[in-house]
Amino acid sequence: MMQTTADIVVVAQCIQGRPEKGLSDTLAAADRLVELRGGACLVLLLGEGADGAARRLAADEGLDVLAICGSGVSPYVGEVYRRVVAGELAALNPVYVLVPHTSQGMEWAPAMAAEMG
């Protein structure tokens, strides 16, 4: 069953049905936060083929994963990602949000963080 709240949210892009390369390092950081602070972790996976990738990631890693796919998030447009992720985060109200350190993550995540406060 998918959780409706999460203390830690990891946001990552799915490219051609595969999670972006930086996701494993970001998941390791999330695991460390869970060890130190406790709480629940959720992965938001956005982009082309995110639904299948989310099922595989959930089965392989035992994670709660929410796939967000469709014409709004594929192909990648930073402004769209910012709006979509902000909406999901507002509903989840996490304490921590982690984004892989990629050029695309650096494009939308700081602007979203500034807007959300």
Image (cartoon, rainbow, N blue to C red):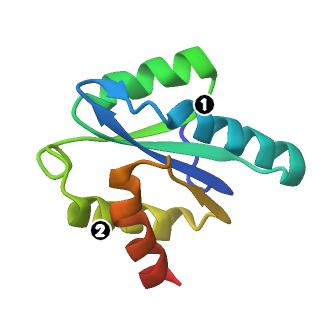
**Residue under the image location 41 percent in, 48 percent down:** 102
Please, what is the three-letter code of the amino acid marked with disc 2? Arg
Residue 20 % position (x, y):
39, 33
Q: Is residue 2 left or right of residue 15?
A: right
Q: Quadrant of residue 77?
A: bottom left
Location of residue 18 with respect to 92 vertically, above or below: above
Whether 109 is drawn above or below 74: the answer is: below
Picture quadrant where residue 48 is located? top left
Side of 89 where 14 appears, left or right: left
N-terminal-most mark, 1 or 2? 1
Q: Residue furthest front?
A: 103
Please determine whether, in this image, residue 95 is positioned above or below residue 20: below
Q: Mark 1 belongs to which amino acid?
A: Leu
Residue 30, position in %: x, y? 69, 44
| Label pair 1/2, CB-CB below 8 angstroms | no
Question: Residue shown at 54%/62% (left/top)?
Answer: 92
- Left or right of residue 83, residue 111 in this image: right
CA separation in Å, label 1 and label 2: 24 Å
Where is mark 2, residue-wise? 83
Q: Nearer the viewer, residue 39 or 37?
A: 37
Q: Residue at x 45, y 18 (%)?
A: 56
Q: Residues within 10 Å of mark 1 (few under 14, many from 20)?
A: some
**Looking at the rendered structure, which numbered label has been put on residue 63?**
1
